[in-house]
Structures are given as C-alpha cells and as structure tokens.
Amino acid sequence: MRVILIGRNPKVTLVRALILAILCVLGYKVTLLHIRVEGISMMPTYQDGSKHFVNRLAYLWHDPQRGDVVGIRLSDPSIMRPSIMYLKRIIGLPGETVAFANGRVLINDKVLDEPYEKYDCDWNLPPVKLGPDQYFVVGDNRSMPPQLHDFGRVERDHIVGKTIL
Amino acid sequence: MKIVFRVVLLAALAALGIWLWTIFFPSPEKIIRRQLNEVAKRVSFTADEGTLARLADAQSLAGYFATNVEVNINTRETDRQSFVGRDQITQAALAARSAVGSLNVKFLDVDVTVAPDKQSATADLTVDANVAGQPEAIVQEVKITLQKIAGQWLITRVATVRILSILNFEPAHALRIVDA
C-alpha cells in the first residue's frame, strides 16, 4: 500500500508531484482566466454574478467564429492578464457589414439567425462596415436600450479568448 | 564552505544594494505608477468626508496636472466633455463631490511607456469607478499623457478610449431586411 501511495523512492515521488503541480499552475495561468460576470448585458445566457472561464488559447489555431462568446480586454494587449473584460458575443466578422433593423441583426443585408436571443429587441442601427481586422460584438440582452449597452466594433487583438464552462 | 558562504553573502549584499538603489532612485515608470495611484486616491471620496477635507482634496488633485492640462471625456454614460487647465479640474472634482455621495476610483492594468528622452510618457489604464447608489461600476479605458516639468511628472492630457466602437460607421446603403 505504501509503495502504491508514495512509490519506491519518496524523494523522486515528491519531485514528480512538485513538477506536476508547477505544470498544472502554469497551464492554468497560461490557458484559463477565471471571470465573474457583472451586469445584465449577456442575460439570459450569462447571469449577473455567475462565474466562468475564458480559454486564452481558443484562437491559437483559428480565428474567432460568429456566435462565440468572447472576453474582450479594455487594456493594452501587453497586459497579460487583464483585470476587467467585456463579455460579448461575436455577430459580425471582418469585412462584413452589420446593421440592426427592428431588432434583427443584418449581416450583409441578410437576417442573422440567433437562437440564443430570447428577449424582444427593437434596435435600429445603420450599417457598420467592419475592417479587415475587426469583429462586431454585442450582448445577448438587447431588451435594454442600445444607449445603455456596450457593443460595436472591436479589433482582433482585444479579443482575449472564448468562454468555456 | 567558506567560499560558498562568501559568494552567498556577496549575492545577498548585491541584491540589497539593487533594492536600495530602486528605493532611493526609482525609475520614471515607478514614479508615474505611484503618482497615478495617488491621483486615484484623490479623485475618490467617501460620504462622511467634511467640507474642508473635500476642498483640500480637490485642490491637491490639481497639483498632479500641468497648468495647461486638457481632459477629454467621451463615454457611453456621459456626453462629450472637455476640461482645460487646473482650475477646471478642481471645479470638476468639487462638482463630483456635491453630485454623488461617494466615489471609489481604481486604476487597473496600468501600462506606462516612457519616451527615450525620459521627458514624456503615456499611461494606458482601465478606470474602475464605483459610484454610491449605482448598481454597476463604471469601467473605462483611458490614455494619460505626462510630461516632466521642473523635475516633476505632471499630467498634460487625459483622453477616454472607446474599445467597442459604433462611431464613424459608414452608411453604405439604406436599411432593408432580406430573409436568409
């Protein structure tokens, strides 16, 4: 039993455990950001006060996709672990034109199907043309007036990662 | 063993020397960070602050700014506002103290860049402001420009930065709905 628990050589086991612990901490620090949602702009998908993780490596091999809920840094990209982020959903991709008409999102003049949208929305906004490195992000709660909602174009380098869990 | 002890002692002394050097001769970046923390403290106030203390704090806040400071605020919460000069900073600080019960301001994720000539610098930071009675904190990215004037780092310009922008959209064509 003792051999199973601590191995043949306790010192080697201790070193292995330490290395494993360090790798776990480093992996967590590099990969994940633990976030707490403040505010109602992502309701009902994300409730005020709920806790989640942002995967910082989500866009290492591919670009952000439409429908992804992402963490958006306010601070300079040189800050590795931003203290505060926006949590928004990507609805527009680089080069596209995004507009709101009677609460419906138009991407290049075509209505976007948004199954996650549960509340009534009456927003009307003129078309916004996205640059080659820009995404259009917005919260899921569009029952609130657009003046009270942070949304719009964001540069790629401000997208920190994709939310998981 | 004696050599090892000497080497360790020497390393410890060198570390102590470097630490003392940074204490007595801090880098411009460190001075600016410390100064910005003090500005955040001066901007903040509590509900039980007396009238004289409010006046003193508002006036001392002006001391961190250059005489020709320019402040441009453009946020979702406020209309576009500009202040020029220290007097307007003091007035704005006093107006804020009479308008709201308490204000707690923190500068987060401060990124200071000092120019090669070490006479000017910029600080990008996130303002996290909690106003009494408001359920949500005000969060705003800000760019601050500082200049070394008479040996002192003073703020010459403050401007808000919009990360999410719906401004300057291109009205490419009229709105119309086309079902996919």
Image: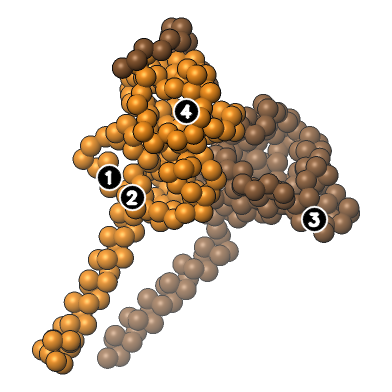
Chain colours: A orange, B brown
Q: Which mark is residue A152?
A: 4
In the picture provided, is B119 more to the left or to the right than A37?
Answer: right
How much space separates mark 1 and mark 3, taking CA atoms? Answer: 45 Å
Q: Which chain does the numbered disc 3 sit on?
A: B
| Numbered disc 3: secondary structure | loop
| Numbered disc 1: secondary structure | loop
Q: Amino acid at mark 2?
A: Ile
The 10 Å Cα crowd at callout 1, few under 14, some 14 to 19, many 20 or more, is some
Work out whether residue A44 or residue B86 is closer to the camera in this orientation and state it.
Answer: A44
| Numbered disc 2: secondary structure | strand
Q: Where does label 1 land, which residue?
A: A58
Whichever of labels 4 and 1 marks the residue nearer the N terminus, that label is 1
In this rendering, which labeled residue sits more in front, label 1 or label 2? 2
Q: Amino acid at mark 3?
A: Ala
Query: Can I make out residue B157 in this image?
Result: no
Query: Can I make out residue B71 in this image?
Result: yes
The 10 Å Cα crowd at callout 3, few under 14, some 14 to 19, many 20 or more, is few
